[in-house]
Image (cartoon, grey):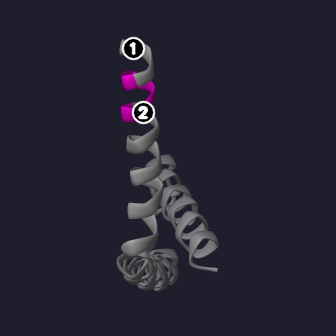
Amino acid sequence: MKKVLLLAIWSSLLFGENMMGGWNSGEDSEEAKAHKVEQARLCTLYTDKIVKYKATMRDDGLAQATLNNYVRLQTKYCEEAK
């Protein structure tokens, strides 16, 4: 009897969880839009940073490492924005 009751409670929780997921899908799309806008903003930011940094960049290893990091971040955010 305990197993049947436990199975009934377990299945109702699983079914309820699946039903609740569809009710807030509007919020998920708003979050996705906000995330996409932020990714595009960061893509533009790092693209501009690279252009400005190359114009004033020193000629040493640390400056090259900084540039490599900006390029890595630009690649990350521009790929996600697409």
* 8 within the magenta span: yes
Identify the element where label 2 is drawn: helix
Mark 2 vs mark 1, CA separation in Å: 11 Å
Whether 3 is drawn above or below 66: the answer is: above
Q: Where residue 21 sits in the image (x, y, percent)?
A: 43, 63
Point 38% across, 83% down: residue: 30
For the residue pair 37 and 69, the one nearer the viewer reads as: 37
- Quadrant position of residue 20: bottom left
x 45%, y 75%: residue: 53
Percent x, y for residue 1?
39, 14
Q: What numbered label is drawn on residue 1?
A: 1
Residue situated in front as seen by the camera: 62 or 47 = 47
43 and 57: which is toward the camera: 43
How would you rate the neighbour count of disc 2 (Cα within 10 Å): few for under 14, some for 14-19, many for 20 or more? few
The stretch of residues the image draws in magenta is 5-9
Q: Percent x, y for residue 2?
A: 36, 14
Amino acid residing under circle 2:
Ala
Say the numbered circle drawn on residue 8: 2
